[in-house]
Image (cartoon, rainbow, N blue to C red):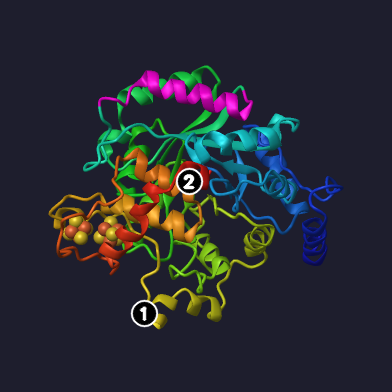
Amino acid sequence: MDTKELNEGRRGFLKKGVTGLAGMAILPSVLSGEARAESEEKKTKKSDKIIYRKFGKTGLKLPIVSMGVMNADNPELVKAALDAGIVHLDTAHAYQRGRNEEMIGGVIKDMPRDSFVIATKIAMPQDRRTGRFTDEATPEGFMEKFETSLKRLGLDYVDILYLHSIVSREDTLHEPFLNVMQKLKQEGRIRFIGVSTHRNEPEVIRTAVESKIYDVVLTAYNFRQPHVAEVEKAMEEADKAGVGVVVMKTQAGVFWDRERQHPINMKAALKWALQKEYVHTSIPGFTEFDQLELDLSVMEDLKLTPAEELDLSEDKQMGVTGMYCDQCSKCVPQCAKGVEIPTLMRSYMYAYGYRNLAVAKDTLESRGISDVPCERCDACTVKCTMNFDVRNKIRDIARIRQVPDDFIV
Ligand code: SF4
Ligand code: SF4
């Protein structure tokens, strides 16, 4: 299939929805094993516009564009993504309070089990200040969430199970959860053990590699990360060790501004993130059909054009800070009240960048952050490394705690 056919096919199906497109779909089979991997390669050649990369030692080859389903609530969009050649769907136990997994379950229920790869994530209670697991983070609680996720997805097993949102070496190696995940793997209820990280990523990735237990790492990675060189080194090491590398937050907050007048060039941002071969796949969180088409189109030519390169430096040209918080935590000790600023900034991005108010509110709720975190503080002493106006952003986002759920869900 040449570029023209592929594009015409996609345009056709985007107009028609997903009906009548089975012939166009080039869905690779994803069971493990070298034979399967070879067969993937042959299919790749046939579908010459989909770029696959070897996914560590898992035996899989995945398209470099996967789907982060987190913000999507339209099953037709998920179907369209699968029909267009996307194989790997990424969700989490907590997304949309379980409805995200349920929606995916509805989409895949009649599909051959070897035609898709499902990743889900389980987050356990963490201390507000340190990000470390609290005493409430028990293996029993973990298992309860896992069983619920399987039920929602309608599956006997998931392909990747991530220990979610890990920030430290100690928690990456937290034995009770590693034991649970290894047991689940032995029982065939998960195929691969993963860890996801949005903060202190290099340490978490390196620890995962060193453990020899993790098969996959999922890390934040984008053109705005101040410590991007360190993240890249750690990903390269993971790749060399045969660990699958998935990247998220590639769109760096989606918009440059709170008013959503200046979108980040999403195609350029995704291309940027896929330049390095040690990045095996990405999970951009598209919510519209045209965004799906745009994300897939990066595979026509991964090279950034001069105009795209310029677009990625718009922050400097326009003097804006964007919405992506690096989660570096350097602000926390500067705040006399010890406000959990990184979490508030993440929630801000979910609300104003992704327009996902439920996740924004859940993020604050799960950390017990109040609707007025800066109350009785006269002057902000925080200097953010990304130059955010921290106080104003906190004021904007924290009030979401007052919004009743039925306005959001
Ligand atoms: S708000 Fe600024 S200083 Fe604080 S974690 Fe985010 S980027 Fe770092
Ligand atoms: S205004 Fe600044 S220093 Fe004061 S509580 Fe809020 S974040 Fe902390």
Q: Which residue is mark 2?
A: 358
Question: For ligand 2, which image quadrant applies?
Answer: bottom left
Local secondary structure at mark 1: loop
Label disc, if present, on residue 399 of the rendered structure? none
The residue where tag 1 is placed is 319
Q: Is residue 9 magenta?
A: no
Residue type, numbered disc 1: Gly
Residue 239 appearing in the image: no
Q: Kindly identify the residue that appears in the image at 24 percent across and 64 percent down.
A: 384
Rate crowding at label 1 as few (under 14), some (14 to 19) or many (20 or more) other CA atoms within 10 Å. Answer: few
Q: Position of residue 106 (x, y in %)?
A: 69, 34
User: Magenta segment, which residues?
Assistant: 135-155
Instruction: For the residues labelled 2 and 1, say whether their Cβ atoms are less than 8 Å apart.
Output: no
On the picture, is 179 further left or further right than 98?
left
* Residue at the spot 76% in from the left edge and 47% down from the top edge: 26
Res. 129 image quadrant: top left
Residue 382 lies left or right of residue 279; in this view the side is: left
**Depth-wise, is mark 2 or mark 1 nearer the camera?**
2
Neighbour class for label 2 at 10 Å: few (<14), some, many (≥20)? Answer: many
Name the spot of residue 59 as percent of width and height, x first: 58, 36
- Point out residue 55 in the picture as x, y percentages from the top left corner: 55, 43
Is the N terminus in the top left, top right, bottom left or bottom right quadrant? bottom right
Q: Quadrant of residue 188?
A: top right
Does residue 140 belong to the magenta stretch? Answer: yes
Left or right of residue 365: residue 72: right
Residue at image position (27%, 38%) is 169
Label 2, label 1: how far apart the Cα atoms are: 30 Å
Task: Check the image and name the residue furthest to the left.
Answer: 336
- Amino acid type indicated by mark 2: Ala
- The secondary structure type at the circle numbered 2 is helix
